[in-house]
Amino acid sequence: MSKIDYVWSWMGRAKYWIVGAIIVLIVGFADDNSFWNRHKRKVVLRELNSEIANCKEQYNNDDKRLREMESDPMAVERLAREKYLMHRENEDIFVVLDEERPEAPADTTTAITTEP
């Protein structure tokens, strides 16, 4: 019985430390609003803010391009030639692919020549 008495007496002396450690464990790791979950949410929030910034930048670029196409009729023709590889009847198109990124056909450089 001496070991049981020793454990009980130790727990009686350290009861505040034990309760404090249990509270720290619950608040730190087990609760829905724990520090661990809070850290994970901050990481996700940072990623989402980065994605929002990228989307805003893409939106601004697309909006600028749209305004340019609405005001300049040659911009529509340029877009059709560059992105969709369209050409006039009397023209040939030579597509030069970038060797660093062969899988991206949208990033091609085109050379348009007219036949005499």
Image (cartoon, rainbow, N blue to C red):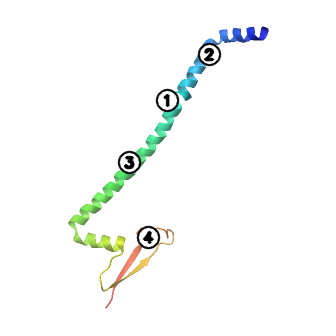
Q: Which sits earlier in the primary sequence, circle 4 or circle 3? A: 3
| Residue drawn at 22 percent across, 64 percent down | 70
Per the image, the residue denoted by label 3 is 52
In the image, which is nearer the foreground, mark 2 or mark 1? 1
Please tell me which residue lies in front, 34 or 101.
Answer: 34
Per the image, the residue denoted by label 1 is 32
Q: Whole-Å distance between the Cαs marked 3 and 1?
A: 26 Å
Left or right of residue 23, residue 93 in this image: left
Per the image, the residue denoted by label 4 is 105
Amino acid beneath label 4: Pro
| Element at label 1 | loop
Q: Whole-Å distance between the Cαs marked 4 and 1?
A: 47 Å
In the image, which is nearer the foreground, mark 2 or mark 4? 4
Q: Looking at the picture, how far across and down is residue 96, in whole percent?
A: 44, 77
Q: Which sits earlier in the primary sequence, circle 2 or circle 1? A: 2
Q: Looking at the picture, how far across and down is residue 87, in whole percent?
A: 32, 79
- Label 4: how many residues lie within 10 Å, few (<14), some (14-19) or many (20+)? some
Please tell me which residue lies in front, 107 or 33.
Answer: 33
Amino acid beneath label 3: Ile
